[in-house]
């Protein structure tokens, strides 16, 4: 459990979960649980002997996608001679999601087994399943 808590703290920090738009602990837990990996002994997450192992970068990428979705309706507008570029937030959050997705894939060594997980359904712009490193 301590390793899980440590990974959850990492996801919170890397995804800037306390900054607007914020993410709750429940949301972060669901995101982290969606990125469970095969452990160092080759055991899958559904094995009773599985040692909790997570792709933190994958969870962070998903967190940034959620945050981007929350600001997707913001747009650039002008008023009183000033321009307000609120859509920059969406671009920034999307760029962060892409950055962490590249890191998640790099950590997998390019070899991944894609399997669906139960629990919290996560929607991804890339896939509806999560990577498991064999």
Image (tube, rainbow, N blue to C red):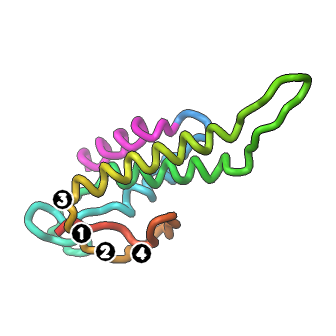
Which of pointers 2 and 3 indicates the residue nearer the eye? 3
Question: Residue 109 has which mark?
Answer: 3
Which of pointers 1 and 4 indicates the residue nearer the eye? 1
Tell me the distance, in whole angstroms, between the alpha carbons under discs 4 and 3: 25 Å
Q: Which of 110 and 113 is in front in this view?
A: 110
Residue 8 part of the magenta segment: yes
Tell me the distance, in whole angstroms, between the alpha carbons under discs 2 and 3: 14 Å
Which of pointers 2 and 4 indicates the residue nearer the eye? 2
Q: Nearer the viewer, residue 43 or 64?
A: 64
Residue 13, percent from left and from top: 41, 35
Tell me the distance, in whole angstroms, between the alpha carbons under discs 3 and 1: 8 Å
Seen at 39% across and 63% down, the residue is 34
Residue 50 part of the magenta segment: no
Provide the residue designation for mark 4: 118
Q: Extreme top residue here?
A: 81
Picture quadrant where residue 47 is located: bottom left
Tell me the distance, in whole angstroms, between the alpha carbons under discs 2 and 1: 6 Å
Characterize the local packing of mark 3: few (<14), some (14-19) or many (20 or more) Cα atoms within 10 angstroms.
few
Characterize the local packing of mark 4: few (<14), some (14-19) or many (20 or more) Cα atoms within 10 angstroms.
few
**Label 2–label 3 contact, CB within 8 A:** no
Q: Where does the magenta region start and end?
A: 1-17
Question: Residue 112 has which mark?
Answer: 1
Count of numbered marks: 4
Q: Going from the N terminus, do you reach mark 1 or mark 4 first? A: 1
Main secondary structure along the magenta-highlighted residues:
helix
Q: Going from the N terminus, do you reach mark 2 or mark 3 first? A: 3
Q: What element carries label 3?
A: loop
Provide the residue designation for mark 2: 114
Seen at 77% across and 30% down, the residue is 84
Q: Is mark 1 on a helix, strand or loop?
A: loop
**Label 2–label 1 contact, CB within 8 A:** yes
> Is residue 21 found left or right of 118 in the rendered image?
right
């Amino acid at each position: 459990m301590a390793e899980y808590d440590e990974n959850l703290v990492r996801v919170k920090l890397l995804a800037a979960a306390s900054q607007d738009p914020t993410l709750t602990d429940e949301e972060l837990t669901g995101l982290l649980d969606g990125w469970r990996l095969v452990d160092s002994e080759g055991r899958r997450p559904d094995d009773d002997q599985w040692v909790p192992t997570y792709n933190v970068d994958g969870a962070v990428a998903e967190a940034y996608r959620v945050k981007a979705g929350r600001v997707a309706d913001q747009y650039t507008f002008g008023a009183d001679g000033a321009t307000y570029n609120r859509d920059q937030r969406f671009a920034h959050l999307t760029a962060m999601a892409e950055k962490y997705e590249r890191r998640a894939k790099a950590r997998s060594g390019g070899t991944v087994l894609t399997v669906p997980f139960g629990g919290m359904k996560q929607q991804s712009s890339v896939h509806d399943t999560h990577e498991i490193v064999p």
